[in-house]
Image: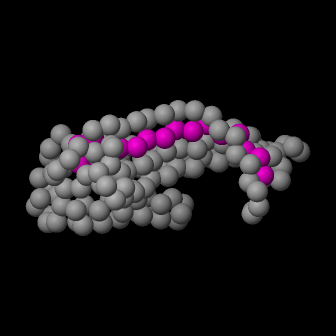
């Protein structure tokens, strides 16, 4: 449970750091979250925090057999990237048209006994971190992952 708290608080701290860095000023940040775009950012933050919590509940259903594990993990990630130029996800102007947010879910369907082979369902999201979206995308799919080395 401590790691869940650490993950959620780290995600909130990352968002707060970016907002203070880009928007500058608590009053301006509060005003931003009253706008349509700011409310969209808040919905995204709340959605990923909800998924963190849902994932911790889902982990109770994992099971193993002699050949591997089924529904072994659900990874959730959120992040921000600087594209150095205008991001294709961002409209120009306002605060930052270079910062792109990303997030997703990796749902393990099967992991081999040696943890080298994984079959996973994935969801990915990219959008502008602060400015209004020019283009964003959400994608759902499957992936096969093979670990070359490591635990």
The image quadrant of residue 83 is bottom left
Q: 71 or 29: nearer the eye?
A: 29
Magenta part mainly helix, strand or loop?
strand
- In this picture the colour scheme is one colour
For the point 29% across and 62% down, which residue is it? 18
**Relative vertical location of residue 77 with respect to residue 6 in this rendering, above or below:** above
Which stretch appears magenta?
A: 116-133
User: Was residue 119 drawn as part of the magenta stretch in this picture?
Assistant: yes
Residue 76 locus on image (x, y percent): 52, 49
Residue 60 appearing in the image: no
For the point 65% across and 38% down, which residue is it? 143
Extreme front residue here? 85
For the point 76% across and 61% down, which residue is it? 149
Instruction: Please tell me how many numbered marks the rendered image carries.
Output: 0
| Left-right relation of 140 to 67 | left
Screen quadrant of the N terminus = bottom right
Residue 69 locus on image (x, y percent): 77, 44
Residue 107 appearing in the image: yes
For the point 14% across and 46% down, which residue is it? 34
| Left-right relation of 131 to 101 | left
Residue 10 locus on image (x, y percent): 42, 64
Q: 116 or 100: nearer the eye?
A: 100
The image quadrant of residue 136 is top left
User: Was residue 100 drawn as part of the magenta stretch in this picture?
Assistant: no
Screen quadrant of the C terminus = bottom right
């Amino acid at each position: 449970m401590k790691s869940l708290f650490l993950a959620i608080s780290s995600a909130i701290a990352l968002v707060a750091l970016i907002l203070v860095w880009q928007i500058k000023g608590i009053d301006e940040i509060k005003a931003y979250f009253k706008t349509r775009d700011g409310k969209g950012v808040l919905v995204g933050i709340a959605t990923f925090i909800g998924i963190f919590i849902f994932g911790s509940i889902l982990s109770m259903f994992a099971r193993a057999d002699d050949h591997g594990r089924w529904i072994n993990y659900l990874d959730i990630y959120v992040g921000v990237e600087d594209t150095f130029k205008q991001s294709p996800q961002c409209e120009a102007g306002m605060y930052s048209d270079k910062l792109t947010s990303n997030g997703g879910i990796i749902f393990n369907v099967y992991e081999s006994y040696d943890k080298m082979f994984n079959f996973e369902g994935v969801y990915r999201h990219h959008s502008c971190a602060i400015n209004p979206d020019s283009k964003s995308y959400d994608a759902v799919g499957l992936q096969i992952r093979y670990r070359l080395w490591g635990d």
